[in-house]
Image (cartoon, grey):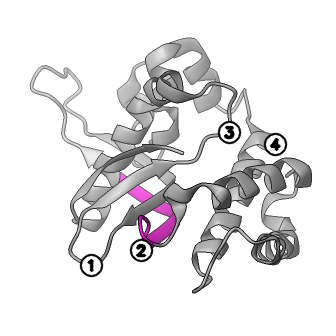
Protein backbone atom coordinates (compact mmCIF):
# COMPACT_ATOMS: atom_id res chain seq x y z
CA UNK A 1 0.00 0.00 0.00
CA UNK A 2 1.36 3.43 -0.86
CA UNK A 3 0.53 6.70 0.86
CA UNK A 4 -0.59 8.05 -2.52
CA UNK A 5 -3.39 5.49 -2.65
CA UNK A 6 -5.00 6.92 0.47
CA UNK A 7 -3.91 10.57 0.34
CA UNK A 8 -6.36 11.37 -2.43
CA UNK A 9 -9.25 13.85 -2.43
CA UNK A 10 -11.57 10.89 -1.79
CA UNK A 11 -9.46 9.54 1.10
CA UNK A 12 -7.22 12.34 2.41
CA UNK A 13 -4.71 11.96 5.21
CA UNK A 14 -5.95 13.44 8.48
CA UNK A 15 -3.71 16.24 9.72
CA UNK A 16 -4.03 14.88 13.25
CA UNK A 17 -2.35 11.64 12.18
CA UNK A 18 1.01 13.31 11.46
CA UNK A 19 2.46 12.58 14.91
CA UNK A 20 1.34 8.93 14.75
CA UNK A 21 2.70 8.56 11.20
CA UNK A 22 6.06 9.93 12.33
CA UNK A 23 6.21 7.57 15.34
CA UNK A 24 4.57 4.33 14.22
CA UNK A 25 3.49 3.63 10.66
CA UNK A 26 1.57 0.47 11.69
CA UNK A 27 -0.59 2.29 14.25
CA UNK A 28 -1.16 5.09 11.75
CA UNK A 29 -2.38 2.55 9.16
CA UNK A 30 -4.80 0.96 11.65
CA UNK A 31 -6.27 4.35 12.51
CA UNK A 32 -6.38 5.48 8.87
CA UNK A 33 -8.51 2.49 7.98
CA UNK A 34 -10.82 2.82 10.96
CA UNK A 35 -9.63 -0.23 12.86
CA UNK A 36 -8.49 1.75 15.88
CA UNK A 37 -10.79 4.48 17.11
CA UNK A 38 -10.11 7.18 19.66
CA UNK A 39 -13.89 7.56 20.17
CA UNK A 40 -14.20 8.71 23.77
CA UNK A 41 -10.95 10.68 23.69
CA UNK A 42 -12.06 12.41 20.47
CA UNK A 43 -15.45 13.25 21.99
CA UNK A 44 -13.78 14.63 25.13
CA UNK A 45 -11.47 16.76 22.98
CA UNK A 46 -14.34 18.10 20.87
CA UNK A 47 -16.39 18.93 23.96
CA UNK A 48 -13.44 20.80 25.50
CA UNK A 49 -12.84 22.66 22.22
CA UNK A 50 -16.47 23.74 22.21
CA UNK A 51 -16.27 24.86 25.86
CA UNK A 52 -13.13 26.86 25.04
CA UNK A 53 -14.80 28.42 22.00
CA UNK A 54 -17.83 29.43 24.08
CA UNK A 55 -15.60 30.84 26.82
CA UNK A 56 -13.66 32.99 24.34
CA UNK A 57 -17.00 34.36 23.07
CA UNK A 58 -17.83 35.84 26.50
CA UNK A 59 -16.86 39.54 26.21
CA UNK A 60 -15.72 39.97 29.83
CA UNK A 61 -14.55 36.40 30.27
CA UNK A 62 -12.74 35.26 33.36
CA UNK A 63 -11.96 31.97 35.06
CA UNK A 64 -14.94 32.51 37.35
CA UNK A 65 -17.08 29.53 38.35
CA UNK A 66 -20.04 31.31 36.75
CA UNK A 67 -18.38 31.46 33.35
CA UNK A 68 -17.19 27.85 33.58
CA UNK A 69 -20.70 26.64 34.54
CA UNK A 70 -22.21 28.65 31.68
CA UNK A 71 -20.02 27.06 29.01
CA UNK A 72 -20.30 23.54 30.46
CA UNK A 73 -24.12 23.83 30.49
CA UNK A 74 -24.00 24.78 26.80
CA UNK A 75 -21.69 21.82 26.05
CA UNK A 76 -24.13 19.48 27.81
CA UNK A 77 -27.04 20.95 25.82
CA UNK A 78 -25.16 20.01 22.61
CA UNK A 79 -24.34 16.50 23.90
CA UNK A 80 -25.54 14.75 20.71
CA UNK A 81 -22.39 16.08 18.99
CA UNK A 82 -20.10 14.25 21.47
CA UNK A 83 -22.27 11.62 23.10
CA UNK A 84 -19.31 9.71 24.54
CA UNK A 85 -17.77 12.61 26.43
CA UNK A 86 -17.02 12.35 30.14
CA UNK A 87 -18.29 15.34 32.11
CA UNK A 88 -15.71 15.25 34.96
CA UNK A 89 -12.80 15.11 32.52
CA UNK A 90 -14.19 17.86 30.30
CA UNK A 91 -14.82 20.01 33.39
CA UNK A 92 -11.25 19.55 34.65
CA UNK A 93 -9.70 20.34 31.26
CA UNK A 94 -11.96 23.37 30.77
CA UNK A 95 -11.14 24.72 34.24
CA UNK A 96 -7.45 24.23 33.55
CA UNK A 97 -7.67 26.06 30.24
CA UNK A 98 -9.65 29.06 31.49
CA UNK A 99 -7.42 29.35 34.55
CA UNK A 100 -4.24 29.60 32.48
CA UNK A 101 -3.25 33.27 32.05
CA UNK A 102 -1.83 32.53 28.57
CA UNK A 103 -5.41 32.12 27.33
CA UNK A 104 -6.70 35.51 28.45
CA UNK A 105 -7.91 38.36 26.21
CA UNK A 106 -4.54 40.14 26.07
CA UNK A 107 -2.72 37.19 24.47
CA UNK A 108 -5.66 35.69 22.59
CA UNK A 109 -7.39 38.67 21.03
CA UNK A 110 -9.09 36.78 18.20
CA UNK A 111 -9.68 33.06 18.61
CA UNK A 112 -11.23 30.50 16.27
CA UNK A 113 -11.86 26.94 17.40
CA UNK A 114 -12.54 23.71 15.49
CA UNK A 115 -11.39 25.17 12.15
CA UNK A 116 -11.74 22.88 9.12
CA UNK A 117 -8.70 22.89 6.84
CA UNK A 118 -7.57 21.06 3.72
CA UNK A 119 -4.72 21.21 1.27
CA UNK A 120 -3.41 19.26 -1.72
CA UNK A 121 0.38 19.21 -1.73
CA UNK A 122 2.12 18.92 -5.06
CA UNK A 123 4.16 15.75 -5.45
CA UNK A 124 7.90 15.99 -5.08
CA UNK A 125 10.02 15.65 -8.20
CA UNK A 126 11.09 12.13 -7.23
CA UNK A 127 7.59 10.86 -6.37
CA UNK A 128 6.92 8.00 -8.81
CA UNK A 129 3.14 8.41 -8.53
CA UNK A 130 3.11 12.04 -9.60
CA UNK A 131 -0.04 12.46 -7.50
CA UNK A 132 -0.68 15.26 -4.99
CA UNK A 133 -0.95 14.37 -1.31
CA UNK A 134 -4.27 15.56 0.09
CA UNK A 135 -4.59 16.51 3.75
CA UNK A 136 -7.72 17.38 5.69
CA UNK A 137 -8.46 18.03 9.32
CA UNK A 138 -10.01 20.13 12.01
CA UNK A 139 -7.57 22.08 14.09
CA UNK A 140 -8.35 22.89 17.69
CA UNK A 141 -7.55 26.57 17.74
CA UNK A 142 -5.98 29.44 15.82
CA UNK A 143 -5.47 32.78 17.49
CA UNK A 144 -3.91 36.11 16.78
CA UNK A 145 -3.36 39.34 18.66
CA UNK A 146 -5.62 41.26 16.27
CA UNK A 147 -6.41 42.04 12.63
CA UNK A 148 -3.34 42.04 10.39
CA UNK A 149 -1.22 39.92 12.69
CA UNK A 150 -0.41 36.32 11.81
CA UNK A 151 -2.47 33.40 13.06
CA UNK A 152 -0.86 30.94 15.45
CA UNK A 153 -1.98 27.29 15.51
CA UNK A 154 -2.56 25.85 18.99
CA UNK A 155 -3.39 22.24 19.67
CA UNK A 156 -5.23 21.39 22.87
CA UNK A 157 -3.74 18.28 24.45
CA UNK A 158 -4.72 16.50 27.59
CA UNK A 159 -2.31 13.57 27.70
CA UNK A 160 -0.02 12.68 30.57
CA UNK A 161 3.12 13.90 28.83
CA UNK A 162 3.96 17.55 29.27
CA UNK A 163 6.51 20.22 28.47
CA UNK A 164 9.11 19.58 25.80
CA UNK A 165 8.10 15.92 25.39
CA UNK A 166 4.50 16.86 24.54
CA UNK A 167 5.59 19.64 22.19
CA UNK A 168 8.00 17.31 20.39
CA UNK A 169 5.41 14.55 20.01
CA UNK A 170 3.00 16.91 18.30
CA UNK A 171 5.36 19.16 16.34
CA UNK A 172 4.59 17.36 13.07
CA UNK A 173 0.86 17.62 13.63
CA UNK A 174 0.99 21.32 14.52
CA UNK A 175 3.21 22.00 11.49
CA UNK A 176 0.79 20.22 9.16
CA UNK A 177 -2.09 22.19 10.66
CA UNK A 178 -0.24 25.48 10.12
CA UNK A 179 0.47 24.57 6.49
CA UNK A 180 -3.14 23.51 5.90
CA UNK A 181 -4.55 26.63 7.61
CA UNK A 182 -2.42 28.89 5.43
CA UNK A 183 -3.41 26.96 2.29
CA UNK A 184 -7.10 27.09 3.25
CA UNK A 185 -7.27 30.77 4.27
CA UNK A 186 -4.34 32.37 2.44
CA UNK A 187 -3.49 34.14 5.69
CA UNK A 188 -0.05 34.07 7.36
CA UNK A 189 0.00 31.16 9.81
CA UNK A 190 2.71 30.12 12.24
CA UNK A 191 3.16 27.35 14.80
CA UNK A 192 1.89 28.33 18.22
CA UNK A 193 2.30 25.13 20.14
CA UNK A 194 0.48 22.78 22.45
CA UNK A 195 -1.76 23.96 25.28
Against 134, is 152 above or below? Answer: below
Q: Is residue 111 magenta?
A: yes
What element does badge 4 sit on? helix
Q: Nearer the viewer, mark 4 or mark 1?
A: 1
What element does badge 2 sit on? strand
- Whole-number angstrom distance, CA of label 1 to CA of label 2: 8 Å
- Whole-number angstrom distance, CA of label 1 to CA of label 3: 30 Å
What element does badge 1 sit on? loop
Q: Give the residues drawn in magenta, as a range.
A: 106-118
Q: Which mark is residue 40?
A: 4
Query: For the residue carrying disc 2, how many other residues have a C-alpha within 10 Å: few (<14), some (14-19), or many (20+)?
Result: some
Q: Is residue 40 magenta?
A: no
Query: CB under 8 Å between callouts 1 and 2?
Result: yes
Query: For the residue carrying disc 3, how many other residues have a C-alpha within 10 Å: few (<14), some (14-19), or many (20+)?
Result: some
Would residue 14 be seen by someone viewing this image from the given angle?
no
The quarter of the rendered structure image containing the C terminus is: top right
Foreground residue among 8 and 90: 90
Q: Please tell me which residue is depicted at 24% across the width and 63% down the height of the picture.
A: 150
**Residue 2 placement, left or right of 120:** right
Query: For the residue carrying disc 1, how many other residues have a C-alpha within 10 Å: few (<14), some (14-19), or many (20+)?
Result: few
* Sooner in the amino-acid sequence: mark 1 or mark 3: 1
Against 45, is 54 above or below? Answer: below
Q: Which residue is mark 1?
A: 147
Against 143, is 6 above or below? Answer: above
* Sooner in the amino-acid sequence: mark 1 or mark 2: 2
**Residue 144 placement, left or right of 42:** left
Q: Which residue is mark 3?
A: 158
Q: Nearer the viewer, mark 2 or mark 4?
A: 2
Q: Which residue is mark 2?
A: 110
Amino acid sequence: MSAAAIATPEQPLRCSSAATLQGCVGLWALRAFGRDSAGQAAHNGSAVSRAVELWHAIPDRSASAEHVEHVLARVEAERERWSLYEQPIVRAWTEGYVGDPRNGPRLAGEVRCEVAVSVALAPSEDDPTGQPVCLRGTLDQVRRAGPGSPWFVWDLKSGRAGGVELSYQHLWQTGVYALAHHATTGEPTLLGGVI
